[in-house]
């Protein structure tokens, strides 16, 4: 047995739920519980910096216990880990504690017994560990709802009156509204288009800026770098400063921010832009697309009056969209893996290619996964999360009787399969 490390090590910055009134501090009782876990072969979760590892107790001594890892490639010594959090179910109660890391030999790690075991609320439903990785997609409102503002005919330029009444029709012809809108937009600049978001373009930079801000992006002089980043004190107009700040908050370095800005400017120069503007187009609960307009004449740039006219045209398009109940094929789903599931909720981990996802606790989300060629869709709230490992605990809500039956059959099938194995 190696000597216990005494260095001042890093501890995972993990949000631990508040303990209940019951707290186990008896060293002998803690050792006895962990000893029982070894005898009945129950699994223990080890919460590390970037993931949750599943293990089983293989040995206990007077001061330590040894776990066999399911991932033989994991090496905690190389990661300079001093403490880990363990989590397991005992007598229907979820317990968790902090253990000092002692040593590792191949797929076995040795930990000190925790000084305290705290408990969470007793589980109402048995939790099933998924031996085989099961991919799932989650959907949530990453972008805030954006409503189109009501507009009266007296607030519009007279030249848009016909479009206003066409958009107000009860049985509006949305194609006609779009064609009329494009015709008016082209009068401001021939270098114009209406972009409607879809699965193919929803990830692009402009779509994210529009959907996140709900404001007009206006670059009055594409020859000046400061036009892209200067502070704009307006509730309606932005440039790329907000977008770059968001990237910075999400961890982008100064070099990455500079490269992103250079790419934006180079794209505009390649098109010959002297000025440009993007106007969001609103749908029932968010941003459905945008109007893009740019000019190539240094002596004929987009003016404040042009921006005002384009905002009015965007509002008219939005009215037509709402009256026509027009929708797109946008699906804001994020890839994830299910770790375990019960009739009350599930635990999932966001896949590595979605590192920038940060869903707040309490958020309502939709989880979709496939079982035997059948799609299962469930809704719930995030009741607990570990942002470092991108793990989210979901508590189901508003489940129909049909979904409850489907979920129960799915879990019963997994339980039977686990027994067979």
Image: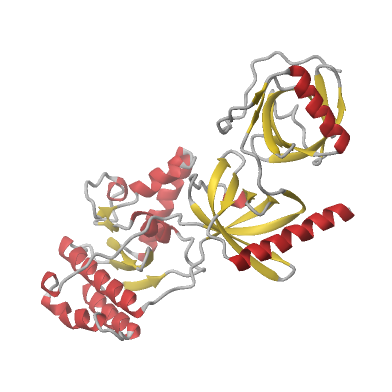
Residue at 51%, 66% in the rendered image: 331
Question: Residue 262, percent across and down?
Answer: 41, 50
The relative height of residue 390 versus residue 189 in the rendered view (above or below) is above
Q: Is 344 placed above or below 305 here?
A: above
| Residue 289 lies in quadrant | bottom left
Q: Quadrant of residue 51?
A: top right
Q: Residue at x 79, y 55 (%)?
A: 415
Picture residue at 39% right of the left edge, 77% below the top: 326
Residue 264 is situated, as x and y percent measured from the top left of the image, at 40, 55
x, y percent for residue 394? 58, 49
- Residue 378 drawn at (x, y percent): 59, 61
| Residue 33 relative to residue 204: left or right | right
State how many labels appear: 0
Q: Nearer the viewer, residue 219 or 249?
A: 249
Q: In front: 23, or 52?
A: 23
Q: Is residue 45 visible?
A: no
User: If the image is split into quadrants, where does the N terminus sit?
Assistant: top right
Q: Residue 114: name its quadrant.
A: top right
Residue 351 appears left or right of 171: right
Residue 364: tell me if it is visible.
yes
Q: Residue at 61% of width from left, 38% of height from top? A: 121
* For residue 43, side relative to residue 345 (left or right): right
245 vs 39, nearest the viewer:
39
Q: Is residue 112 above or below residue 222?
A: above
């Amino acid at each position: 047995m190696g000597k216990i490390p005494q260095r001042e090590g890093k501890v995972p910055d993990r949000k631990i739920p508040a303990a209940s009134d019951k707290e186990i501090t008896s060293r002998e009782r803690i050792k006895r519980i962990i000893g029982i876990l070894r005898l009945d072969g129950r699994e223990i979760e080890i919460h590390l910096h970037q993931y949750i590892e599943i293990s089983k107790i293989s040995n206990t001594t007077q001061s330590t216990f040894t776990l066999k890892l399911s991932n033989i490639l994991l090496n905690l010594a190389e990661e300079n880990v001093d403490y880990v959090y363990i989590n397991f179910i005992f007598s229907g109660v979820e317990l968790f504690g902090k253990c000092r890391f002692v040593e590792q030999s191949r797929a076995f790690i040795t930990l000190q017994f925790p000084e305290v075991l705290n408990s969470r609320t007793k589980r109402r439903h048995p939790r099933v560990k998924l031996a085989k990785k099961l991919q799932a997609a989650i959907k949530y409102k990453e972008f805030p709802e954006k409503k189109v503002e009501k507009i009266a005919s007296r607030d519009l330029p007279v030249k848009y009156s016909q479009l206003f009444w066409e958009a107000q029709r009860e049985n509006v012809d949305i194609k006609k509204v779009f064609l009329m809108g494009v015709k008016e937009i082209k009068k401001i600049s021939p270098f114009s288009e209406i972009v409607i978001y879809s699965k193919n373009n929803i990830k692009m930079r402009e779509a994210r800026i529009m959907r996140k801000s709900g404001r007009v992006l206006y670059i009055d002089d594409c020859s000046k770098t400061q036009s892209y980043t200067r502070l704009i004190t307006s509730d309606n107009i932005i440039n790329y400063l907000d977008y770059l700040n968001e990237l910075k908050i999400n961890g982008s370095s100064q070099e990455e921010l500079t490269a992103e800005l250079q790419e934006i400017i180079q794209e505009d120069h390649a098109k010959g832009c002297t000025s440009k503007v993007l106007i969001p187009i609103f749908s029932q609960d968010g941003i459905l697309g945008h109007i893009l307009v740019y000019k190539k004449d240094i002596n004929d740039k987009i003016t404040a009056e042009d921006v005002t006219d384009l905002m009015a045209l965007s509002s008219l398009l939005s009215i037509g969209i709402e009256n026509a109940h027009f929708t797109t094929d946008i699906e804001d789903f994020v890839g994830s893996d299910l770790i375990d599931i019960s009739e009350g909720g599930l635990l999932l981990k966001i896949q590595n290619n979605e590192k920038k996802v940060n869903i707040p606790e309490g958020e309502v989300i939709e989880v979709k996964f496939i079982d035997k060629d059948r799609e299962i869709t469930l809704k719930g709230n995030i009741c607990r999360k570990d942002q470092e490992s991108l793990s989210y605990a979901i508590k189901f809500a508003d489940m129909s009787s049909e979904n409850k039956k489907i979920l129960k059959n799915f879990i019963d099938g997994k339980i039977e399969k686990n027994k067979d194995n």
